[in-house]
Image (cartoon, grey):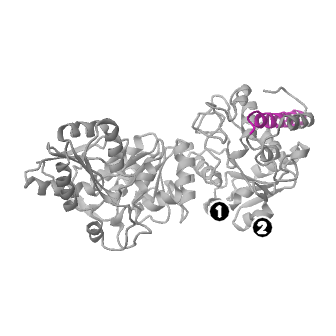
Amino acid sequence: MTKHTVLDNKDTRSGFGAGLLELGKTNPAVVALCADLTGSLKMDAFAKEFPDRFLQCGIAEANMMGIAAGLTIGGKIPYTGTFANFSTGRVYDQIRQSIAYSGKNVKICASHAGLTLGEDGATHQILEDIGLMRMLPGMAVINPCDYNQTKAATIAIAKYDGPVYLRFGRPVVPNFTPTDQVFEIGKAVIMNEGSDVTICATGHLVWKAIEAIEILSHQGIQCDLLNLHTIKPLDETAILNSIKKTGCVVTAEEHQLNGGLGDAVAQFLSRNLPTPQEFVGVNDSFGESGKPEELMVKYGLTSNAIVEKVLAVIKRKF
Amino acid sequence: MSNKEQLTELVTQTRRDIVRMVHAVQSGHPGGSLGCTEFMVALYNNVMEYTPKPFNMDGNNEDIFFLSNGHISPLFYSVLARAGFFDISELSTFRKLNSRLQGHPTTHEHLPGVRIASGSLGQGISVAVGAALAKKMNNDTHTVYVLCGDGELQEGQIWESVIYAAAKKVDNIILTIDLNGQQIDGATKDVLPIGDVRQKFDAFGWQTFHMANGNNIDEVISVLNDAKKACGNGKPIAIIMKTEMGAGVDFMMGSHKWHGIAPNDEQLQTALAQLHSTIVDY
């Protein structure tokens, strides 16, 4: 079993803020936009350091998306920042027409995704954003797992020519990926190798999966773990190679079962290698107020839930 | 092009293009297209500085234009083609399968001259503001033009962008509002009255210009020049342009009826009889 060490505990949004600041220093084309959530998005440092390249848009997300699209026409690389809910559902048509269909090089950076936003409740806890974004032709969808990976992803997407949805979160969680790990869009990171089951996890559920693997190892079950930080384009080769070895899969995400990573993996496998699959995610439900960890337990997004699904899917192997 | 006779001829030819394009596929939006013809012809042939070929998406060091009310695409396409962005023969592909001339303008098919998709209303001013800000960051002193409809002002995003542009002193943008008083369901005053548009823009901190007759080419040029001179004074600029929907074709004028329907064969002939070919049909 691969040993993963917790380097420290940090929020992924701070990884975004750190990545953005670094980009500001290295790439003069990068412009940041925010809709009255500069502190929440950890964009303050960029705003302070590069005031001429920071656009405070106020509580007007539709306009922010349009401005971002327009900035690309002058050769800028705009990074928009607001909560995931206001980055997607609220502005879907603006993203669809002015960014995705228009092929604009906008980086839509979305914090406070999923249940772990916590106490603010379901109005703000979007669990549909991955689905909304991956349906748009040409939109890359990225959901890193920790601070280091979010920082690396933030920097990497500047070099990718096209619209990107970058999703991260609010809570302080283990930071365990190497500081110097290169972020490759669309390339899964193999976090553990084993031949009994494949676990495909994204975002905050990657660490939960690592915890699950530890529990399962004591029961003699060896897991492949793919950190699918990129949901679109999906790393089909990595998934196929792993499934050929294990013959079953569990997907895990902080998102609705409808439309998310599990759907993406199932759709790919159904066409290429039909495989027994179990899903860890939110089952057609809105969230509610509560502490992030309480919510993760109530809605079944825990290492124990992954363990249960692994035991179930192994029994279903062909 | 500064010769008034040439501009007038181009206006008439553009109107012929519009009715012929819409007739050919029995779909599209002739009303607003005909109403804004003088404006678009003047803008592209007398006011804006740009290079049609090779088309540069970034639009650096040239004036650029965005069409927010994308449904008047027949006008946009005719003006672009006759300004040299692409061959006029391509106008015959309008709204047909595999065409670059989609029902509503798009960058997706790489049609030169189009820098953003539009059609879902209310988005163009925001995009123009973004492009104008990029010009400022690039020390490019050229102007960004954007056209929107008056019914379109019912969209909320318009007012987000209007607040922003004034607050952030985006003074290299000239918005023109086509005040034809019509929208699909009827007269704007009946569907959802939008009040005094000029007062609203004044109140929001824009510098406004009134164009009493947007179907008079002299007045269009004069007001556009005045607007251009006002750029750089710390305020975004709006031209409230009164036009007649369907202008140039008598039976299409005076109501909302021809917003989005095509003339039949007989109506086409009636229309063309009022718009004598001045240059050459596509």
Residue at 67 percent across and 49 percent down: it is: B68
**Mark 2 or mark 1: which comes first in sequence?**
1
Residue extent of the magenta highlight: B1-26
- Dot 1 falls on a residue whose secondary structure is helix
- Numbered disc 2: what chain? B
Question: Was residue B257 drawn as part of the magenta stretch in this picture?
Answer: no
Above or below, B96 relative to B207: above
Instruction: Say whether mark 1 and mark 2 are on the same chain.
Output: yes
Foreground: A293 or A181? Answer: A293
Above or below, A126 relative to A132: below
Q: Is residue A1 left or right of residue B39?
A: left
| C-alpha distance separating marks 2 and 1 | 14 Å
Instruction: Name the spot of residue B124 as percent of width and height, x first.
Output: 64, 51
Above or below, B37 relative to A117: above
Question: Was residue B5 drawn as part of the magenta stretch in this picture?
Answer: yes
Q: Is residue A272 left or right of residue B280?
A: left
Task: Give the prevailing secondary structure in the magenta stretch.
Answer: helix
Residue at 71 percent across and 61 percent down: it is: B206
Q: Residues within 10 Å of mark 2 (few under 14, many from 20)?
A: few
Residue contact between numbered discs 2 and 1, judged by CB atoms under 8 Å: no
| Residue A186 is at least partly visible in this image | no
- Numbered disc 1: what chain? B
Instruction: Name the spot of residue A30 as percent of width and height, x first.
Output: 46, 48
- Dot 2 falls on a residue whose secondary structure is loop
On residue B195, the disc is 2
Q: Which residue is mark 1?
A: B159
Q: Amino acid at mark 1?
A: Trp
Q: Quadrant location of residue A145?
A: bottom left
Instruction: Name the spot of residue B27 as percent of width and height, x first.
Output: 73, 40
Q: How many numbered marks have been drawn onto this rendered protein structure?
A: 2
Q: Amino acid at mark 2?
A: Gly
Q: Which quadrant is the C terminus of chain A positioned in? A: top left
